Amino acid sequence: MALTSSTVERLVEWCAKNDDIADIRAEARADFFGYDEPGPVSYIADTGEIVSRERRFLGWFTFGFRLPDGRHPAELAVTALLKGDELNSALDSIQKAKYVTAVVTTVVPGRGLYLELEDEEFEVNSRMLSHILQRGGTLSTYILPTSRDQWLPGPGWVAWQSNLD
């Protein structure tokens, strides 16, 4: 069974709220947001307010951060929430997740879009992003494979629209 958007959200919620990893999550949050930096930290314009920044942290923490044992928090979440073939499929997707900053080459309204990063192309299934982005825009996000040629966006994406067309 392929990973779904709702399963991704369940994994992120587990990683955001699980008490067993609360201390690690707090340390990771401090690193991510630069709480210990000596000077003020400023963010790139147009990257959203605190809610979207928190979503970006959760995307990074869930799919990019490594626990002391080398696993991603998403791997803990998936083993706590899923069983059998669904578990194995989701673990495979998590281990193949990528962070990309890629250009939108095609938008399929109401369905998704195609991203290009150097010599790679990704078909990303997201109704919401298909309504937000246009050809020539840029998307930065974690993507997770759901099948051989299809991907889901992770939480906390940042989108920029260019006026190249």
Image (cartoon, rainbow, N blue to C red):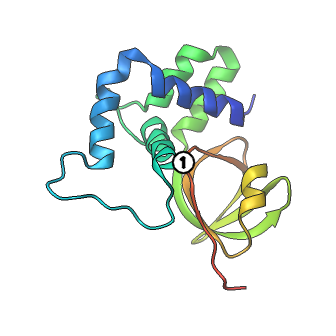
Q: Nearer the viewer, residue 1 or 17?
A: 17
Residue 85 in picture, x, y percent from top left: 69, 20
Query: In terms of image quadrants, where is residue 135?
Result: bottom right
Q: Nearer the viewer, residue 40 or 113?
A: 40
Q: Nearer the viewer, residue 129 or 148?
A: 129
**Amino acid type of the residue tagged 1 in the rendering:** Gly
Q: Quadrant of the N terminus?
A: top right
Residue 142 in picture, x, y percent from top left: 55, 49
Residue 23 in picture, x, y percent from top left: 29, 24
Q: Crowding at label 1, few (<14), some or many (≥20) Cα neighbours within 10 Å?
A: many
Asked whether the viewer can see residue 21, the reply is yes
- Would residue 88 appear left or right of 54 to someone viewing this image? right
**Total tally of numbered discs in the picture:** 1
Residue 137 in picture, x, y percent from top left: 65, 72
Q: Which residue is mark 1?
A: 156
Query: In terms of image quadrants, where is residue 44?
Result: bottom left
At a point 43% along the width and 43% down the height, the residue shown is 57
**Farthest left residue?**
38
- Would residue 136 appear left or right of 127 to someone viewing this image? left
